[in-house]
Amino acid sequence: MAEHSLLSIKDLRVDLMSIRGIVYALDGVNLELGEGLIHGLVGESGCGKSMTARSILRLHDGKRSRMSGEILFEGKNLLSLSEREMQDVRGKQISMIFQDPMNSLNPLYTIGEQISETVRRHEKCGKTAAKARTLQLLGKVGINPPDRRYRQYPFELSGGLQQRVMIAMASACRPKLLIADEPTTALDVTIQAHVLELIHSLSGEMGMSVLLITHNFGIVAEVCDRVSVMYAGRIVETADTRDIFRHPAHPYTKALIESIPKAGTGEEYLPTIPGTPPELFERDPGCPYRDRCPRAGEACKVRPMDERIVTAKELATEQLQGIEAGHTVACWQAAQAR
Amino acid sequence: MFRYVLKRIVQMILIVLAASVLIFVMVRVTPSDPIASMTKGKRISQETREALVRQYHLDKSQPEQYLIWIKNAIRGDLGDSFEKKQPVTTLIADRLPTTLQIVLMSSILALLLSIPIGVLCAVHMNSAVDRILSSVTLILVASPVFLTGIVLSLIFAMKLRWFPSFGTGKTFVENLRYLFLPSLALAFSMVALIARITRSNMIEQLHSGYAQAAVAKGMPRRTVIWKHCFKNALIPVITVASIQIGTMVVGAVLVENVFALGGIGDVLISSIKSSDYPVVQGITLLLVVLFALINLIVDIVYAWIDPRIRLE
Amino acid sequence: MNKDKYSLFGHRPMIKTRRRKEGRLFTVPMVISLVILLTVIFACIFAPLISPYSPTEQNLPDSLALPSMRHLLGADKVGRDLLTRLFYGGRTTLLSAIGVVAFSVVVGVPLGLAAGYYGGIADVVIGRVCDLVLSFPSLLLAFVFVAGFGRSMANAVIALGIVYLPMLIRLVRSLTLIEKNKTYVEAAGSIGYSDARILFFHILPNCVSSIISQITLDLAYAILDLASLSFLGLGVQPPTADWGAMLDEGRNFLLQNPLLALAPGIAIILTVVALNLFSDGLHQYFEPLQRELPSFDKVEKRAGKKKEAVYG
């Protein structure tokens, strides 16, 4: 990749203890996030998108999970920081917004208090300064009039406004990275676009990278610079947004893109992907997608798969022409086809 | 906010009135001869008998008797005791301070012990601390108040002689010592329940979305626990605590009995046994009113904590 | 059949085996509680077979005998064997407690279901009646009930049953409200099942786990509250005795033989602790958030052993 990478996840594994046994939720995730880019993370529910996001901030219940691998943020490994050092990273350098803004705001405090609390925590400033900053932030995310809204409680705001509050809170300390975990899923369709636009413009304005988690390829097409596709706890393909729509290399990515409804094509049926993702109670030595993959062969069953980078040199040959540098795919068949 | 409180007060008055009907009906449900309990079976002349019947309005119909009772009760007159021939209010007035002090002291002790225990257990869920504290409180709740009282008095009053084993002092301050063991016994029986509710609600709040969001924005663990989660967990805890304080009024009856304190509990029980209806009715009504007042205060505290109630 | 279903989609079934659940129902506290409960129940049922003495027959030469081979726990003031009386007292206590809970379940569950399912006027009326009962702090209503209807164990049981009603009704109501809106209820309604069938065969089974854990707890409280009533002389009447009444008798001889008070007390504590543990165990099992899970090492060790067994 050309850009200097802000965040680099290497071979991240997360195991969870559940009432049905150990779940190998993330099984070797590798991800590079460029500075100032909006990076989409796509996949169906339960594939580990949110898990990846939560891992970056180390939000898992320590007793019921364990992590290994590396998460390098500006060169330092977040997994080896102490809890106290981590607290200084959270909200200051990396912040996060969640799917359901209603549940993410404390019902008993005014939104003003909840934002300025964050400012006070990280900027080490007094109450008045924090309040001034908060009012400014509220105006910036389009919550008007700020001074009246400052005194309101979460239940007095609509879902869209609540999510704007979350965004104001998350961008309060000008973090380098914003993790947005399905920020629009719980909102009305009409409001979704506004919220996405807000994230997009803030990212540009503040030079903030965004890791945008979604199950919706439409959103990716709209706002993302790059995108990674996840399946069953692994990242199967990463590419620039334009490339992935033009030349999806992984069979799963292809199937996902084919199953996006298109207006005016006159087709009666939307293609679907048969089967369900595997349950992650055992470490799968093969490709997790092979049970649903039309192109699966012997190779997929036995050998563990590594991320394979299709370099520009390799691309010059045969079928995958047109795929640009920085396109990685984790699939034997795609690699062979080249 | 004002309308909310007003609504609560109206509701409270209605419920107390309904309760007063229930008390009256239940106490008088079985036909018995009140005169017999007044005279303790002694023979009396017909004239005396008729005078007594008139004095206690026993010649009137039941609904009329109820109306007379409740009208006087609102004016602060609860009638006269059958047995002791004294106004019920006088009987109560002498003894109420003791009972109230026990309830007050044990409420404070119970809250001071149980809430920190509950939070500690929630934060260290399933750890050794959690297990030990939970077991101790469990044994305390399983022990009937009077047994705890007896054991405490056996150890600290009879053997060690740190506290008096029975009776009351003359002033509030003196009573802090006299009533300590009874209050402790009573508090112990409440600790487990309040601690348990605190624990389970704290666990729920610690796993909530806003707790996670608070962690994600870099709040220190102490702030997440005490500022964010605790305040939310407090709402159900207050509900249970208020019911528990009501229970303490009854629990006070038991410890008064064990420590021979002569509070209103003693009077209530002995008048139940001797069918002294005006006293039973009067004390019960008083306790119901007290309980309703506690609930009213709790409702106001709710509104104070929770903006969703305050602003709607 | 199953095979066909999968071959339709041309891929292998994903869930091959029913996996064992982590975190067992029969944890250590659960086993302890079951052992205690079974022992107590066994001793109470077979009291006449185990014990050579009569619980009521007086034997003055043995008055206040200390523990010996003849009387394992000693004898009371009129020479009755304490252990024997403990067994028989347990019978009364347990049967009455079960009576209390049975009463509140039989009346409360249908009312709660109706209030939750139908809403409207039924809900309002049931809710108001609950409020009325709850306006009396805990046992006070039972006191008044006993004052009116007379002192006896049967009345104490009914009175406590009424006191326990509102909590159970509210629990069942809130569970019903949650279940009512689920798809399976709609489905059952859409194929024309009667309300009664939906309520008792569809909604109720889904609420049963919470209800059971609640009534186990109620059973524990019933034991304590009945003991309180008997201790105050408002419950069981002589010559029958339950644990509460025995405690009341025994406390007069604390210095001669403390066991007379402590033994029934300990019996109460053990039974109540066991019931609490049982209820907690059920609750934790059904509430995965609070269930204690084994460590990673433990699970992997177990899995490793299994594999070794297969290969070796």
Image (cartoon, coloured by chain):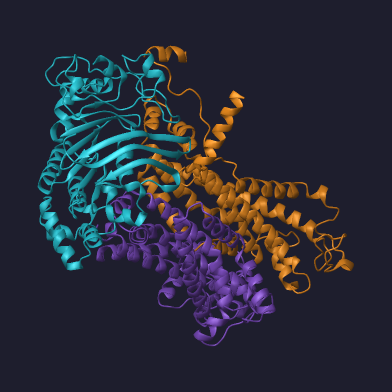
| Above or below C68: residue C290 | above
| Above or below C123: residue A244 | above
Residue A315 appears in the picture as rendered: yes
Number of dots carrying numbers: 0
Give the colour chain A carries in the figure. Answer: cyan
Q: Residue at point 43% right, 78% down?
A: B76
Q: Position of residue C109 (x, y in %)?
A: 50, 44
Quarter assignment of residue B230: bottom left
Which chain is painted in orange? Answer: C
Residue lying at the far right in this picture: please name it: C61
Residue lying at the far front in this picture: please name it: A313
Q: Quadrant of the C terminus of chain C?
A: top right
Residue lying at the far bottom in this picture: please name it: B170
Quarter assignment of residue B52: bottom right
Q: Position of residue C235 (x, y in %)?
A: 65, 61
Q: Nearer the viewer, residue B199 or C200?
A: B199
Residue B62 appears in the picture as rendered: no
Quarter assignment of residue B50: bottom right
Relative to residue A56, is residue A322 drawn left or right? left
Relative to residue B203, is residue B99 drawn left or right? right
Q: Position of residue A47 (x, y in %)?
A: 33, 32
Relative to residue A90, is residue B202 drawn left or right? right
Which chain is painted in purple? Answer: B
Q: Residue at point 17% right, 27% down?
A: A325
Q: Nearer the viewer, residue B69 or B238?
A: B238
Q: Position of residue B125 (x, y in %)?
A: 48, 53
Q: Nearer the viewer, residue C221 or A73?
A: A73
